[in-house]
């Protein structure tokens, strides 16, 4: 909700200045709590569909002024993302590199940092996310069960 309120303020400011500005927002089927179906085992699209009306009601309760609210998995979003990617690639503005990312061998999927919790290697705080420690502020690279993941270039 914080991100939506901040964006709503910025969009209203731009519109008040007379600028053409559209507030486009979506439920994200790739968000950590949706990827892989979360704890429910549902497909990410089913999970997003099941919470869509609740999210819209929350947004309307805070008077958020979306011009469009949809899903990151929509055909329109796919077409627009491909259009942007291909334009950037044609202009040689896409860099390709191999990264290391945590991998779950049982589910056969790469894991978002927020899927992984454990002990901070710096301060030993328990129950910290895979990318940073909320106790000491450390950020770290992964050293456990990573696989190399190449880009689509
Ligand atoms: Zn720490």
Image (cartoon, helix red, strand yellow):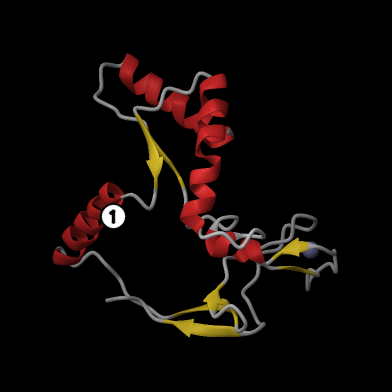
Specify the quadrant of the image occupied by residue 65: top left
Q: Which element carries disc 1, helix, strand or loop?
A: helix
Name the outermost residue toward the left. Answer: 90
Specify the quadrant of the image occupied by residue 26: top left
The reply, left or right, for residue 152 in relation to residue 106 is left
**Quarter of the N terminus within the rendering:** top right
Above or below residue 76? Residue 56 is above
Q: Which residue is mark 1?
A: 78
Above or below residue 31? Residue 57 is above
Depth check: give the residue in front, 151 or 121.
151
Depth check: give the residue in front, 83 or 26.
26
Q: Looking at the image, which residue is at 28% across and 55% down?
A: 78
Q: Looking at the image, which residue is at 54% across and 51% down?
A: 47
Q: Looking at the image, which residue is at 85% across and 69% down?
A: 124
The reply, left or right, for residue 98 in relation to residue 101 is left
Depth check: give the residue in front, 18 or 76.
76
Quadrant of the displayed image that contains ligand 1: bottom right
Q: Looking at the image, which residue is at 53% across and 76% down?
A: 109
Residue 46 appears in the figure: yes
Report x, y in % for residue 142.
63, 77
Report x, y in % for residue 131.
64, 65
């Amino acid at each position: 909700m914080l991100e939506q309120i901040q964006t709503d303020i910025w969009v209203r400011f731009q519109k008040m200045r007379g600028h053409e500005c559209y507030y486009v927002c979506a439920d994200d089927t790739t968000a950590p709590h949706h990827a892989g179906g979360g704890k429910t085992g549902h497909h990410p699209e089913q999970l997003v569909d099941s919470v869509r009306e609740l999210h819209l009601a929350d947004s309307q309760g805070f008077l958020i002024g979306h011009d469009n609210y949809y899903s990151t998995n929509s055909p329109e979003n796919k077409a627009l993302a491909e259009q942007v990617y291909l334009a950037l690639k044609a202009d040689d503005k896409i860099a390709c590199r191999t990264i290391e990312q945590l991998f779950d061998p049982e589910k056969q999927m790469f894991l978002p940092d927020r899927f992984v919790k454990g002990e901070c290697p710096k301060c030993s705080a328990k129950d910290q996310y895979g990318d940073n420690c909320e106790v000491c502020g450390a950020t770290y690279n992964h050293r456990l069960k990573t696989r190399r993941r190449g880009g689509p270039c």
